[in-house]
Image (cartoon, rainbow, N blue to C red):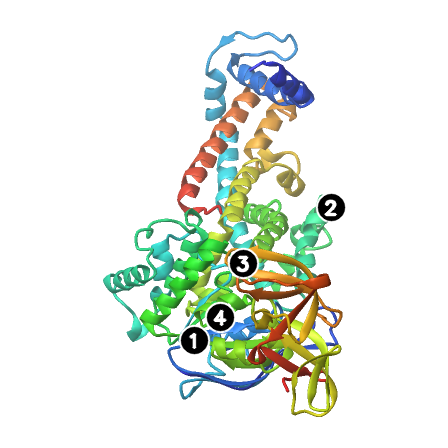
Amino acid sequence: MFSKNNLKGWLYLLPALVFIGVFMVYPLIDVLIYSFEEGYNFASQTYNGIGLYNYSYVLHDPYFLQAIKNTFILVIITVPLSTSIALLISLALNSLKRFKDLFQTIFFLPYVTNTLAVGLVFMILFKKTAYSEGLVNLLLNMFGISSIDFIEGPYWAKMFVLCFYTIWIVLPFKILILTSALASVNKDYYNVARVDGTSKWRIFYRITLPMISPSLFYLIITGFIGAFKAYSDVVALFGVDLNATGMNTIVGYVYDMLYGNSGGYPSFASAAALILFVIVLTITVINLLVSKENVHYQ
Amino acid sequence: MKIVLEHLTKQFISRVNKNEIVTAVNDFNFEIPDGKLIGLLGPSGCGKSTTLNLICGLETPTQGKIYFGDLDVTELPPENRGVGMVFQNYALYPHLTVRQNIMFPLENLKGNEKLSKEEINKRALEAAKLVQIDELMERKPNELSGGQQQRVAIARALVKTPGVLLLDEPLSNLDARLRLQTREQIRRIQKETGITTIFVTHDQEEAMSISDLIIVMEKGVLQQMGEPQEVYNNPHNLFVAKFLGTPAINVFEGKIKKKKLYIGDDLIGESDNDDQDVYVGIRPEAFVPSDKGKFHCAFDRIETTGRDTSIVCHNDHCISDEDIRAIVDADVKLNNKDGIIRFDLKPHKTYVFSKTDGKRI
């Protein structure tokens, strides 16, 4: 392992290794250690003992359970929806003969738009203020439906806004990936299929889908991971006191345990972070297993 | 099935200059007889593939009609024309096995054409046996050699027993040895099935060796159609003469003066035509070294490649890009005094072309 040549190699790798060690490996191990230290006191940096109490506390904390529920709902709704909407839009874009570039640009705009600006747009759309009901409510009123408070109202309304926002914010990137994947499918496959009299649906299902499956799979995996890590979007919509609004996510819970009103509990935060890690790992492994059958790398 | 093209024309708008119109296929009129193997031959970009796409329906003609038998198929979409097509890159679905690839067209059938699973399997196996890949049925395309992939593509095109089989540059992605084998395979498969087959190629040797008929085209214009040997022996114009044959035909500046044909000052033959400047094409095998030969060249060297012995020489009036090549008997005795070599020319291998339009005169 440390023959002369290898030594050189390791030397070249050293800067990267140092960075990874300091900023990735060490904190990871630290989090693991924190999560088992019971009754850790932030001020005196002492703890009572070692055990699973932190995990037990977190798992019994109603705020954490709410955060888990919120996160799972968010993941289950937004990942399939955003991916399939992106796929539909990409297919439509790909079949356009004229104005393709124009529409591609339009669909990609949100990606380069400032998050705060996006937040503002959503305020205009959904937020009830002293001066305005919000654009969506105005529309609802037009159809004779009474106003709904999307930001401070019922749980389902808030969840709807959150999912809507998340889907909207992740769409451009997914569309970008999928349009390029679709464009890279060799046209001859479609020509062969046409000569052979393949129906449109069958072409999509048996040719297009398998051909773009690696990109699709990449988007699903990163979509899952991204949605599980949701936090900043929630803050942008509902403010920082997420526990009070009942809209907290797992990452939000971790943050609150560290720095929020109830903060100063690195052990609880670490335990929650590790639970999130295990969840994401499990989902990713399941994804990988499923993908073995259905994803076709060339 | 017999294929008839009537005034078939296809024009595109140029990709480079939007105001320019490119005529890929220019007023084609010909009839392809039933059950023959046809080589569609021409240099790259001459409109061969466009012709093929027009026949299979992937492109719609700007003008003209296409008939399969007596049926006008000009307006029919490709799936209703009953054609099988093999693309240059084979376009095998990479995620499907050989069996699934071959079964694919059959699974598309709907309504009363729909086949049972067993029937589909049976037909796929028959097609695979025909092209001799029935032992590779469970493999994926990337586990096959180029030649095997090629045969899978043919099996897939044949499985629906089409009336017409179209092959776009079927051999260009194969190495030299495989190319020889595969072209024999194509010949055999065509003979066994009797399906009218058109294949596109830029390789004249390939077209000459297996086709019943060849169609030579250049810049969208049909140059000549006929049996390969006939076209070779009797080219209608300078392009066809230059395009067929390896080594290529030697072309000289010549002139007709008082019913006599000259290259430089060498009187090499007679002509019934009026006085004019002409091109003279002389096939490499037309040269017979002879001390009293009428035509003289500056001797350069002798080259032996395999069984062919060729004399390489120069003549100021030669306008071919390469040196003059004369293929001669291996045991020929050469008498090249002062570096000059003299030839007799076989008249039926010597052609005269008009200098204005390249037509044979």
The secondary element bearing badge 1 is classed as loop
Residue B20, how many percent across, how many down? 73, 76
The secondary element bearing badge 3 is classed as loop
**Residue pointed to by mark 3:** A186
Labels 3 and 1 within one chain? no
- Residue type highlighted by circle 1: Asp
Residue A159, how many percent across, how many down? 55, 45
Residue B104, how many percent across, how many down? 37, 62
**Residue pointed to by mark 2:** A114
> Which of label 3 and label 4 is nearer to you?
4
Labels 4 and 2 within one chain? no
Residue occupying image coordinates x 30% and y 55%? B134
- Residue type highlighted by circle 3: Asn
Gap between marks 3 and 4 measured at Cα: 31 Å
**Residue pointed to by mark 4:** B208
Labels 2 and 3 within one chain? yes
Is B264 or A32 nearer to us in this picture? B264
Q: Chain of mark 1?
A: B
Which of the image's four quarters has the N terminus of chain A? top right
- Residue type highlighted by circle 2: Asn
> Which of label 2 and label 3 is nearer to you?
3
Labels 3 and 4 within one chain? no
**Residue pointed to by mark 1:** B212
Q: Chain of mark 2?
A: A
Gap between marks 3 and 1 measured at Cα: 33 Å
Residue occupying image coordinates x 50% and y 58%? B307
Is A29 or B213 nearer to us in this picture? B213
> Which of label 4 and label 2 is nearer to you?
4
Residue occupying image coordinates x 58% and y 13%? A2
Q: Chain of mark 3?
A: A
Instruction: Inspect this view and state whether residue A78 appears.
Output: no
